[in-house]
Amino acid sequence: MTTFFFILMGFFIVIANIIAFIFYNKKKNLYFAAFVLLLLAILFGSIGGVLAIFIIHDPFAIFYGIQLGQYLVTNSIIVFMMAILVSIIKKYNNRKV
């Protein structure tokens, strides 16, 4: 059962990153992609928690969804920090020219 939830967690993380990448390609805005990842963290965390409750039949299974949401929020923070770094580098290069 644990293996199933680890695979599901990896699947949700990969799908969230693919969706954020698609939005990045459409809008060309890294901040928007980080925001989409943040929203997907809430969505996939709740889906994972509800799915765990239905599979395990234990109310404490909701903590699986919270843990999944925590990983996705961390992922969103990393993308946001990358966006800030890219903005700083672009500003520095534009000032130099």
Image (tube, rainbow, N blue to C red):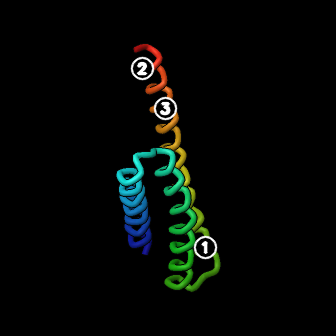
Residue 52 percent location from the top left of the image: 52, 77
- Quarter of the figure with residue 11: bottom left
Secondary structure category for the residue under label 3: helix
Q: Amino acid at mark 2?
A: Asn
How many other residues sit within 10 Å of disc 2, few (<14), some (14-19) or many (≥20)? few
Q: Residue at x 51, y 45 (%)?
A: 31
Task: Using the rendered image of the protein, determine whether residue 75 is visible from the camera's viewpoint.
Answer: no
Q: Of label 1 and label 2, which has the lower sequence position?
A: 1
Count of marks overlaid on the render: 3
Q: Which residue is mark 1?
A: 62
Q: Which numbered mark, 1 or 2, is in the foreground of this view?
A: 2
How far from the left and from the top, in percent, is residue 80? 52, 43
Cα separation, mark 3 vs mark 2, equals 10 Å
Q: In which quadrant will I find the N terminus?
A: bottom left
Residue drawn at (40%, 51%) of the image = 24
Say which label, 3 or 2, has the lower sequence index: 3
Return the residue at label 3. 87
Query: Dots 1 and 2: beta carbons under 8 Å?
Result: no
Q: Amino acid at mark 1?
A: Ile
